[in-house]
Amino acid sequence: MNIKRCKFNPIVTCKDVVPSSRDFEVIGAFNPGAALYKGEIVLAMRVAERFKDNNDGHIKIPVIDGQSAALKTVDLDKEDDRYDFSDSRVIKEKDSCCDFVYLTSMSHVRLARSTDGVNFKIEDKPFIFPENRYESFGIEDPRITEIDGSYFITYSSVSQYGIVTSLAVTSDFKDYKKLGNIFETENKDVVIFPEKINGRYFALNRPVSKSTGDPVIWISESYDLLHWGNHRILACTRKGHWDSEKIGAGIPPVKTDRGWLELYHGVDDQGHYSMGALLLDVNCPSRIIARSEKPLLDPRMDYETGGFFSNVVFPCGAVKKHEKLYIYYGISDNSIGLAAAALEDILSTLG
């Protein structure tokens, strides 16, 4: 498979991003949605920040007030035996069945622009910032789908109520409108197809069952992008494969002469995140034509095997130019990488 990583990877790191507040430090710039807009490649990056001063036996946690949209600080004593502080990413309550009660950081969406797809100018201020009760712990992992000149951005909203998928829209990457929550908890990795198929919109999504079963990719339909139904399983995990533990949609599907190409992430039994492909019927996207037997991209470079959450290749955005696909992927919850391949080369791996 002739897929090439950019020699300048990682092309964006947290050191390239200005904190949104003097009280914060940026600990990650990763998992970007991507779009082509007026000759530029625009990335909508997830930027994770935390309070700078957390070394006095206390930990300060950023939280958005769901009523006022104001930023608040939750101050916890690290000696408080009600909580488990062992994971640097989350705070757990020892007697709770929840995965976490707080995140130690807060994420927002920041824009970066480039004329060559490699060197990006990153905006100093957030583009989309958390502001309601569903976003009180932050907003994460945006994907961008262009439909008739409007750019629809799906993202995960995190709060004490769980993780839901929200939708925003922009026409110019200057102003935007939030359209509300489109998939309830626990659902993420939502990507929208770029055109109607037989009069309906389609989206891939990844609900997570708390009772049984692996996280797998579902497909859903809508007439208005806001109300979704006819939910059904599209693709499952495969034991003994590179995607044995969980899978989730990566980039918004790309239309080709052979069908819809979806680049997705899969996790193996070692916890390594890799990228593979699905080929879906162009007129019936709930039908899989072909699927990657081996990863197209897996964590093997030093900058992919280290980092905040190591061994992660996490595709979120791609831009098609001259029959070549430029894939922007998150690296280990820390930075952004670029890989490119001819569209035909990717399709050739699918038989």
Image: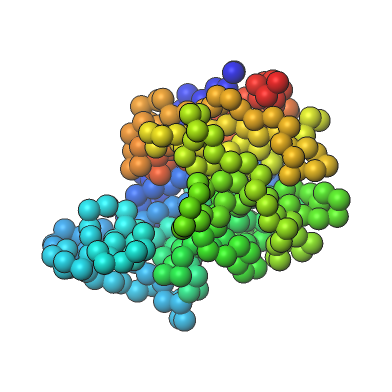
Determine whether, in the image, residue 282 is placed left or right of residue 41: right
Kindly tell me whether residue 338 is visible in this rendering.
Answer: no
At 45% from the left edge and 81% from the top edge, which residue is drawn?
A: 68
Q: Front-most of 56 and 213?
A: 213
Which residue in the rendered view is the most extreme toward the right? 198
Residue 168 lies in quadrant: bottom right
At 74% from the left edge and 48% from the top edge, which residue is drawn?
A: 194
Which residue in the rendered view is the most extreme toward the front? 212
Image coordinates of residue 117 in percent, x first then y, are 58, 35
Say above or below: 141 vs 297.
below
Image coordinates of residue 129 in percent, x first then y, are 49, 64
Residue 38 lies in quadrant: top right
Image coordinates of residue 250 in percent, x first then y, are 58, 42
Say above or below: 311 vs 193.
above
Which residue in the rendered view is the most extreme toward the bottom? 67
Specify the quadrant that holds the C terminus.
Answer: top right
Kindly tell me whether residue 211 is visible in this rendering.
Answer: yes
At 70% from the left edge and 62% from the top edge, which residue is drawn?
A: 228
Q: Front-most of 20 and 285?
A: 285
Q: Front-most of 249 and 109?
A: 249
Residue 39 lies in quadrant: top right
Which residue in the rendered view is the most extreme toward the top? 2
Specify the quadrant that holds the N terminus.
Answer: top right
Image coordinates of residue 251 in percent, x first then y, are 61, 42
At 30% from the left edge and 72% from the top edge, which residue is drawn?
A: 73
